[in-house]
Amino acid sequence: MNIINASITRMEEVEIFGVPALYTPCKVSRQTVHLGLYCYELRMDLEGSPVRRLADQAGDGFIGTILTPVPVEGTAGEGRIVQPEDFQTGLEAGYYTPAEFEEKYLAPDYDPLRLEQIYGKTD
């Protein structure tokens, strides 16, 4: 499986447990994750009925990487179960690099017009 550079890769903006986040179906190099973002892996348990879990490391059943601006509780060990309503994709919010995402959610002077001028897109 390819491991990508998280600092330069555009990822889909999603929402997990009510928190805005970035999602990619690829594994990311943990050394390339921006300081201030938390990296988790989404996995599918295939025993019995399929269950998605968010964990620090997915191991078998890996289905994607999630970057969040705040820590997500309960991800140690087996990980936290992710119900369908807990993980929202297809929000048409856009694709961002972690730096763009941080600017959007963590910069105190965020200006969507400036973001459009710099990156040629809107929220």
Image (cartoon, helix red, strand yellow):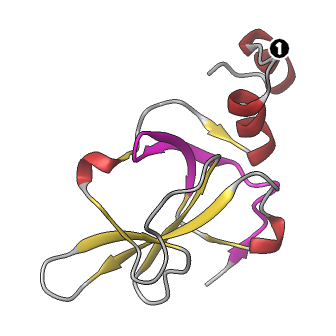
Position above or below: 77 against 70 = below
Q: Amino acid at mark 1?
A: Arg
Pointer 1: what residue? 114
Picture quarter with the C terminus: top right
Q: Is residue 4 magenta?
A: yes
Number of numbered markers: 1
Q: Residue at x 39, y 82 (%)?
A: 78
Q: Residue at x 55, y 80 (%)?
A: 57
Position above or below: 82 against 53 = above
Q: Nearer the viewer, residue 97 or 110?
A: 110
Chain part drawn in magenta = 3-23
- Residue 54 in picture, x, y percent from top left: 43, 67
Q: Residue at x 20, y 75 (%)?
A: 50
Position above or below: 58 against 98 = below
Tell me the chief SS of the magenta region: strand
Q: Secondary structure at mark 1?
A: helix
Q: Residue furthest front?
A: 73
- Residue 63 in picture, x, y percent from top left: 44, 72
- Residue 112 in picture, x, y percent from top left: 72, 14
